[in-house]
Every structure is written in structure tokens, then in C-alpha cells.
Amino acid sequence: MMTRNCDAMRILLALIVAGSLALWAQDAPPPAPQLDKVAAEPQKEVEEPDAQAQEAAEADQPDPDIITVPAGTKVPLTLKHAISTKSARVGDNVYLESSFPVTVEDRVVIPAGTYVQGVVSSVKRSGRIKGRAELLLHFTTMIFPNGYAVSLPGALESLPGAENQKVKDEEGTIQAEGTKGRDVATAAGTTATGAVIGAAARGGKGALVGAGVGGATGILIGLLSRGDEVRLETGSGVEMVLQRSLELKESRLQAEGRELVPVRPSNQKLPRPVLTPPPN
């Protein structure tokens, strides 16, 4: 009997111990993570902004140092030397000077006295029978008083005050006026003169013959004579138009430079020195 009770007590004690261990395992904290595994995991890289997108955003912002003179702006100029279709050749340089300041947003960007250089692009002399004289110029360079130079996309717009020539197209071609009326007047004048001479010599019949001879002479003079040439005198006013926008650097416009002093002509005589007698 005693043996059976001892066995029962042992079984009960074993059950109690097993239950206690099970409860302790449930309440125990989770195992700490292994440091080696954490260190081995790769860290995510910090995303950097796209460099191309940043450069594009900076390119869209206007440069505060740039002043844009819009296309279509007109610049009045004065010719520094005479030019004519009678003597001009393709490639000849043309020199002009601005005669009035040009402003953009209430600021003077092209002051009066700015030099402009151009080139003769086409020359056509007047014909003896038909064809008017034509001259085409293009402006290539602008030089500011401080020496700042820029490439210039300019063409001739108009000839203020010109009487015997005009600008005929958008390219700026200068064309001489026609001489048809003058040729008719010449023929009429020679016809009348021939009629008077013929009438004085042979009467009525002679007047008819003289008129015919005089008219033929007038027509012959018109055929053998060239029409008017295009000629721009020194100091002639012309108007240039910008064919596309012109970008200028404000820092260069405001920079001080060497003043451009005109060269003394070689044929100009120097003033005669005044001789002062030595003191007694």
C-alpha cells in the first residue's frame, strides 16, 4: 500500500514540474537578434535628385546678365562713306554709326555713336535698255563705344529722305527709280527740235522729216544711256532692322573701355608752332 502511494506522489510531482516548465517557457522574453545578421543586411541607399533634371531647371531660368533686344527692333544709322552701284563690289565693307539711342524696358542698350559694320551682298548696275540698278547690304557686327563687339543679324529697312531710290523687298534691296518718263521727255524734246529745224529748212514737208529724225535720235539716246545708279552719299540716313533677337551682356555694356579716338587724316596739316623769342 505504501509503495503505491509513493508512486502516485512521484507521478503528480512530475506533472507539476512539467506544467511549471511549460508556463515558464511561454513567459520568457524572445531571443535577442544576432548582431552578425543585422550587420550583414545591406542598408538602403539614400536617393539623390536627378542631376539632369536639376540642370534642366537651371537652364530654364533666365540669365540676369543677359539683355535681349527683340527681333524687329529698328536702329537709325548714318553712313560713314559714299557707296554706289557704279563702283561697289560684292564683299566690300560698309561702315555706319548709330544716330539715336535704342532702349529696352526704359534702359538704353544701344547708345548713339555705336559703330555698325556691314558688307555688300549683291550689286546690279542699271541696264541700257531695261533693268534698274540694285544694291543689297547686310549688317554683320556692332561695336559699342567701350569696345564691346557682338555679331549682328541686321538688314536694311528703309532710306529716310531718299528721293531717287527705294527699298523694294524684305531683304533690304535698294533699287533705283526708273527713267521711263525721262526717256519719253528726251524723245519728245528731240522730236520738237527736229521739227523746228526741218520747217525752217524745207517748210512743212521738212518739218515732218525733221520730227522723224529728231524722234529717232531721242530713242537712240535713250537706248545708249544707262539708267540711274544707286548712290548713297556720306552722311545718308538708313534704318536697320534686327532680323532676330540680339542678346547683350549687361556687364559688358557697363564695363569701362578705351575710348575710340578717330585717326587724324594723313593729309591734315599740323598747327604751326609759335616761336617765342628768348628773354633778354
Image (tube, grey):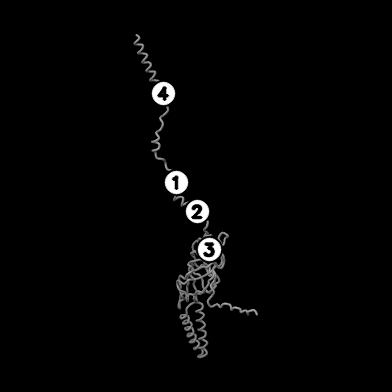
Residue 132 appears in view: no
Which of disc 1 and disc 4 is earlier in sequence?
Answer: 4
**CB of mark 4 within 8 Å of CB of mark 1?**
no
Q: Which residue corresponds to the image point at 53% horizontal and 63% vertical from the top-left?
A: 73
Query: Label 1: how many residues lie within 10 Å, few (<14), some (14-19) or many (20+)?
Result: few
Binning the other alpha carbons within 10 Å of mark 3 as few (below 14), some (14 to 19) or many (20 upward) gives: some
Q: CA distance from mark 1 to mark 3?
A: 46 Å
Look at the picture and state if 102 lies above or below 233.
above
Q: Are marks 4 and 3 in contact (CB under 8 Å)?
A: no
The circle drawn on residue 48 is 1
N-terminal label among 4 and 3: 4
Give the residue type at disc 3.
Thr
Image quadrant in which the N terminus is located = top left
Closer to viewer: mark 1 or mark 3: 1
Residue 124 versus residue 196: which sits nearer the camera?
A: 124
Q: Residue furthest front?
A: 280
| Distance (Cα) linking label 4 and label 1 | 50 Å
Amino acid identity at mark 4: Trp
Q: Position of residue 167 (x, y in %)?
A: 50, 70
Q: Nearer the viewer, mark 4 or mark 1?
A: 4
Q: CA distance from mark 1 to mark 2?
A: 22 Å
Looking at the rendered structure, the kind of residue marked 2 is Gln
Q: Are marks 1 and 3 in contact (CB under 8 Å)?
A: no
Residue 30 at x, y = what percent? Answer: 41, 29
For label 4, the SS is helix
Would residue 73 be visible to someone looking at this image?
yes
Residue 89, given in percent of the width and then of the height, sits at 45, 74
The residue pinned by badge 2 equals 61
CA gap, disc 4 and disc 2: 70 Å
Residue 34: x %, y % from top left: 39, 33
Q: Nearer the viewer, mark 3 or mark 2?
A: 2
Q: CA distance from mark 3 to mark 2?
A: 24 Å
